[in-house]
Amino acid sequence: MKKITSFTVDHMTLLPGIYVSRCDTMDGFTFTTFDLRVTRPNFEPVMNTAEIHTIEHLAATWFRNYYEEYDMYFGPMGCRTGFYLIWKGKASAEEIKPIIIECFRFIRDFEGEIPGAKPEECGNYLDQNLPMAKFLAKKYLKVLGDE
């Protein structure tokens, strides 16, 4: 079986940041998959599921409110070191960076009830950690040069 592209990246040298993982064209539409690497693989502790879940709820809500025509998907990596963003159109990491900064500022500054965190809205609604999600958002903003 052919190895997928993301498994060919040396995760021992991969640093937190924003990377273009791949570009795909389907039915005349181009989609860019971004690797939003929050923690350094194999060197830093991975994120726990509760804060990943909270970031996913907040970021997905934010993207669908402000960039619905471009956001195709926002979700966690299985290794728990970051997130994938699938974006309609071809874009570079530098082009998407201001949007990612805006999103993670929203997460860092968020107060109140986490969107979609009720039993009728989510299959694991209790697995949330807003304080850690905010901590990680602040940490990631530093990586992106925002703080």
Image (cartoon, rainbow, N blue to C red):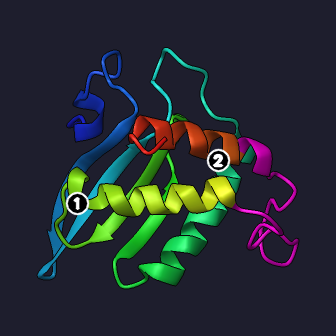
Residue 129 in sight here: no
Residue 22 in sight here: yes
Q: Residue at x 75, y 46 (%)?
A: 50
Name the residue beneath numbered marker 1: 95
Instruction: Point out residue 77 in the picture as x, y percentages from the top left corner.
Output: 49, 44
- What amino acid type is highlighted by mark number 1? Glu
Name the residue beneath numbered marker 2: 52
Instruction: Point out residue 81 in the picture as x, y percentages from the top left corner.
Output: 51, 34
Q: Quadrant of residue 17?
A: top left
Instruction: Point out residue 85 in the picture as x, y percentages from the top left corner.
Output: 40, 59
Range drawn in magenta = 110-132
Q: Residue at x 85, y 78 (%)?
A: 120
Instruction: Point out residue 134 in the picture as x, y percentages from the top left corner.
Output: 68, 47
- What amino acid type is highlighted by mark number 2? Ile
Q: Residue at x 78, y 65 (%)?
A: 123
Q: Quadrant of residue 62?
A: bottom right
**Count of numbered circles in the view:** 2
Outermost residue, front side: 147
Say which of 116 and 114 sits in front. Answer: 114
Dominant secondary-structure state across the stretch colored magenta: loop
Q: CA distance from mark 1 to mark 2?
A: 24 Å
Q: Taking 73 as reference, is 52 left or right? A: right
Circles 1 and 2: CB atoms closer than 8 Å: no
Q: Note whether 109 is above or below 28 in the view shown.
A: above
Say which of 102 and 93 sits in front. Answer: 102
First-in-chain label (1 vs 2): 2
Q: Residue at x 22, y 60 (%)?
A: 95
Mark toward the viewer: 1 or 2? 1
Question: How many neighbours does mark 2 have within 10 angstroms: few (below 14), some (14-19), or many (20 or more)?
Answer: many
| SS state under label 1 | helix
Q: Note whether 136 is above or below 96 in the view shown.
A: above
Q: Taking 119 as reference, is 146 left or right? A: left
